[in-house]
Image (cartoon, grey):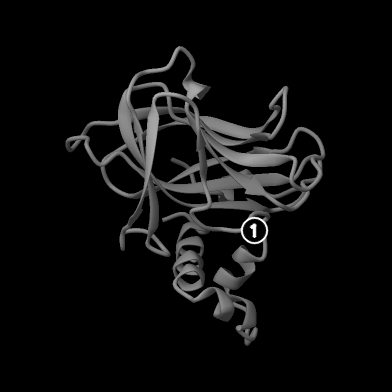
Amino acid sequence: MRPILTPLMAATVAILAMPAQAQQAAPAEKSDPADDIMKKAINKPGTNWSVYGPGQTVKALKDDGVPGGQVLRVTVTAKGANAWDVGSSSPIQKPIAAGDMILVAVYMRAPELKDGETTPIPFLGANGVAAPYENVVGNPVAVTRDWKLYYASGKAPKAFPGNTVRATAHLAAEKHVVDLGPVFVLDFGQNYDPAKLPRN
């Protein structure tokens, strides 16, 4: 298992399982790897997705299969002319410096698939909130029927002020059902070895 995967999952379970008031009031005792990783978060981790585009419906669900138990089920009723015709986005509140190593991690599944099947998400990552929607990091992923963390990572091509980029998943490549769980966007700063980050 890659070095950052276990602390990231442990941290998300611990933080999202706490009530919001406890998350803010919890005293910092001694540092551990999970604490250190979550200090790198530049978004508010959680299932705070906004879904856009025609030909889709959204339903909030509870599911113990993800940290925090909150899920959005997106049903795309027809394949779009473009993969981005239906998508989901989640705000990134903190600024990003040029050259920072960014990791986007999202819990996803496609619950109506059979074992061994996948459905395409042509873009998972982070991009600008306004035209020309410049990419920060991103790549395609193939989602299975089971809950899994999917990743996009890379160096930011330039500096982005806070609240000018968002985590994004393009969902209109197929007619399908996709469940979106929590999203985490982490900034590892300059000169971070990308080999230490998890891959799909």
Q: What residue sits 55% from the left and 69% below the top? A: 34
Q: Quadrant of residue 177?
A: top left
Labels in figure, total: 1
Circle 1: residue type:
Ala
Does residue 184 appear to the left or right of 158 in the view shown?
left
Q: Is residue 108 above or below residue 134?
A: below
Seen at 55% across and 73% down, the residue is 20
**Quadrant of the frame with the C terminus:** top left
Would residue 183 be found to the left or right of residue 42 on screen?
left
Q: Which residue is more in the foreground, 135 or 22?
A: 22
Relative to 200, is 175 on the left or the right? left
In percent of the image, x 32 and y 23: which residue is there? 175
Q: Position of residue 193 (x, y in %)?
A: 66, 48
Q: Position of residue 18 (x, y in %)?
A: 48, 76
Where residue 134 sits, quadrant-wise, is top right
Instruction: Report the residue marked by disc 1.
Output: 41
Q: Residue furthest top?
A: 81
- Quadrant for the N terminus, please: bottom left
- Local packing at callout 1 (Cα closer than 10 Å; few below 14, some 14-19, many 20+) is many
Residue at 69% across / 27% down in the picture? Answer: 133
User: Is disc 1 placed on a helix, strand or loop?
Assistant: loop
Residue reaching furthest to the left? 114
Q: Position of residue 172 (x, y in %)?
A: 42, 24
**Which of the two residues, 28 or 68, is positioned nearer the viewer here?**
68
Which is nearer the eye, 11 or 133? 133
